[in-house]
Image: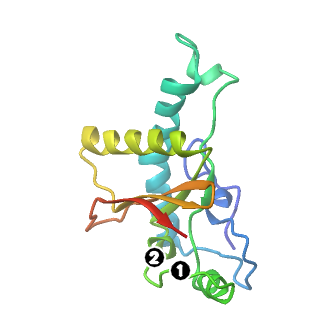
Amino acid sequence: MVDKHQNLSEHFTLGELIKTSYKTPDGNEPPLEAVENLVGICEFWLEELRFTYNTLYVLEPHEDYDTSENVEGIIINQGFRSYQVYEAMKRAGLNPSPTSNHMRGCAVDIRCAGIEQALRYMVILLDMSDQNHRDFDELILERRKSVYWLHFAVRPNDNRKKILFFNEQ
């Protein structure tokens, strides 16, 4: 049994990255390899995305990042997805990919307040990739009606740097 309170990084817990609205007998419990992949996304990408976004767009000039009450968190809609969750999504009429990076703990869907925040997140992630010489697998701006989110994936190897806009769900 996994500890949902386990920190994957300073600001992200395992519980945040395995939550799902699909109730399954396995409880969407990830294997160790998936947890390790989620740790990598949190430590090397999401923490810096959070810091940079808050520094550029949320905090007042010269305000101390660590003590500000205005700091926003990055909200994850979905991270790891077990095979049972995949099957439940299919039964619900969705069309999840059987080879999704979510199923290996290599992807997160990041909630966005709107198109502007989504684009800012995308630019920050692209800049991070360039500046740190780190590749990602997928950066996809998705929406369902007026709800936006970013699908962001990083594999341990063979990353494709695939970028898509408005992949309708």
Q: Which-is-in-front pick, marks 1 and 2?
A: 1
In the picture, the quarter occupied by the N terminus is: bottom right
Residue farthest along the front direction in this orientation: 145
| Image coords of residue 91 (percent x, y) | 67, 89
Q: Position of residue 43 (x, y in %)?
A: 47, 47
Q: Residue at x 47, y 71 (%)?
A: 33
| Residue placed furthest toward the top | 62
Residue 72 placed where, x, y %?
63, 34
Q: Which residue was labeled with disc 2?
A: 100
Q: Is residue 128 above or below residue 58?
A: below
Residue appearing at x 65%, y 56% in the figure: 6
Q: Residue at image x 55%, y 70%? A: 169
Q: The residue under label 2 is which amino acid type?
A: Ser
Element on which disc 2 rests? loop
Apparent side of residue 57 relative to residue 88 in the rendered image (left or right) = left
- x then y, percent, for residue 76: 61, 54
According to the picture, the residue beneath numbered tag 1 turns out to be: 96
Rendered image quadrant of residue 17: bottom right
Q: Amino acid at mark 1?
A: Pro
User: Do the numbered discs 1 and 2 sit on residues whose CB atoms are within 8 Å?
Assistant: yes
Mark 1 crowd level (few <14, some 14–19, many ≥20, 10 Å Cα):
some
- Residue 36 visible to the viewer: no
Residue drawn at (60%, 48%) of the image = 12
Apparent side of residue 117 relative to residue 92 in the rendered image (left or right): left
Q: Kindly state the secondary structure of the residue where label 1 is placed.
A: loop
